[in-house]
Image (cartoon, coloured by chain):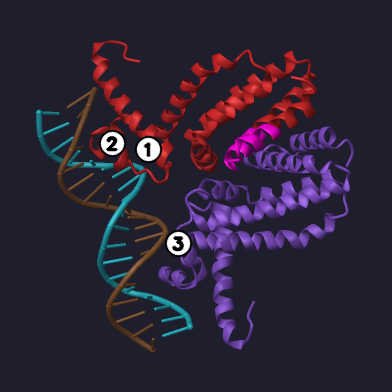
Chain colours: A red, B purple, C cyan, D brown
Amino acid sequence: MAKNNRDIDRAVKVEAIELAATTLFTEQGYESTSMAKVAQHAGVATNTLYWYYKNKDEILVSVLNRLVNEGLTGFSLVATEPLNKQIMWLLNKLGQVNTLISTVHSKVEHSAEIRKWHDQFHLILDQFLISQLLTRGIDKKQASLEAAIVTFVVEGLLSHSYPKQQQELIVNLLIKEHLGNA
Amino acid sequence: MAKNNRDIDRAVKVEAIELAATTLFTEQGYESTSMAKVAQHAGVATNTLYWYYKNKDEILVSVLNRLVNEGLTGFSLVATEPLNKQIMWLLNKLGQVNTLISTVHSKVEHSAEIRKWHDQFHLILDQFLISQLLTRGIDKKQASLEAAIVTFVVEGLLSHSYPKQQQELIVNLLIKEHLGNA
DNA sequence: ACCTGAACACCGTTCAAGT
DNA sequence: ACCTGAACACCGTTCAAGT
């Protein structure tokens, strides 16, 4: 991140702030975490946060991008598994941040920052799912619809925190009925 | 609601408050609507709201129950239609309150009031869907899983505000793959 | 029983002033 | 360029006082 020595200090501060925000947002929730708490955790004054970020939403977007990047590096390990295993892995991963997912959905209409992130994330996830379905011989017109259904089921399982066993039954049924084999 | 004359005044006030809250919550969103705005719209002082309700969440629950009751009376008109028509009707109905649905999901973990309402609502919806699936000859063990999938797709279509045409394609595909005919 | 003015603690954000 | 103390407008909620 730091391009040269002059940026190192900045990078360290930003790291401290985003680490604090990530911990607090995921453990206590976004709305329950005040800017004061983030600042205190990062060891700066509250208004210092506004030197690095435009507002609280922008910190949330940074945290989300961090979590996505962390997740992407881990995905390579299951990239060759069958689709239902991949989805179970995704469910487990997203389960750790499911309160943030709800937060994003509830703010998507009122914050342009967050809407932009949300739409982009769904675009990427959608394209990935469609490509997976195409290699499994699904009709191109249908693949787009199936991808949406898979996404909705993943989000539904997360936001209603089903037990892992139930998750697995539903995912397997979904894959079987929609893809035949996978 | 008013059991006798002595309750009439109370019923009128409650009606004014809940009418104001329903309008403001659905049009501007729950978080963007302050207690002061609700009070002003209802023609009372802000703290008067706390005579009738324990807190803001409790007003939200009252509003939700109102909307559900309104919806239920309308449902009788499509009760005999095929399942995909019923779901499209539900989507259209819930689409008018989809910001409130997101609000409920984001508060479900932090508010016992709202969690209670949410769980109860899903229980009722689930039982209804299962009964519909059973009469269409779906295996009992599977019906429960299918009902969950249908619910998740409905919520997904709502929270990502798909255009009606896309909604219809996805619902029809879902019904076809999961129920054969309906 | 019902209603309110005034206050409370907290929130996200801004600004003028410092280095 | 970076950081902060102090203030601002707003929020949900409470309390003592009225009728």
Q: Quadrant of residue D5?
A: top left
Horizontal side of residue D8 vs A71, given as left or right: left
Q: Residue at x 68, y 50 (%)?
A: B94
Q: Where residue A137 appears, x then y in whole percent?
A: 78, 15
Distance of mark 1 from mark 2, alpha carbons?
A: 9 Å
Horizontal side of residue A182 vs A34, given as left or right: right
Whether the magenta-drawn stretch holds residue A139 is answered as no
According to the picture, the residue beneath numbered tag 1 turns out to be: A24
Q: Which residue type carries mark 2?
A: His
- Of marks 1 and 3, the one in the foreground: 1
Q: Residue at x 33, y 33 (%)?
A: A20
Distance of mark 1 from mark 3, alpha carbons?
A: 28 Å
Q: What secondary structure is the magenta-colored segment mainly?
A: helix
Task: Give the number of the disc on residue B35.
Answer: 3
Marks 1 and 2, the one that precedes in the sequence: 1
Q: Tags 1 and 2 in contact by the CB under 8 Å rule?
A: yes
Q: Which residue type carries mark 3?
A: Met
Residues in magenta, as a range: A152-169
- Along the line of sight, the residue nearer the viewer: B159 or B179: B179
- Dot 3 lies on which element? helix
Residues packed near mark 2 inside 10 Å, few (<14), some (14 to 19) or many (20 plus):
some
- The quadrant in which the C terminus of chain B is found is top right
Task: Give the number of the disc on residue A41.
Answer: 2
Residues packed near mark 3 inside 10 Å, few (<14), some (14 to 19) or many (20 plus):
many
Task: Tell which subunit mark 2 falls on.
Answer: A
Q: Tags 1 and 3 in contact by the CB under 8 Å rule?
A: no
Asked if A146 appears above or below B18 in the picture, the reply is above
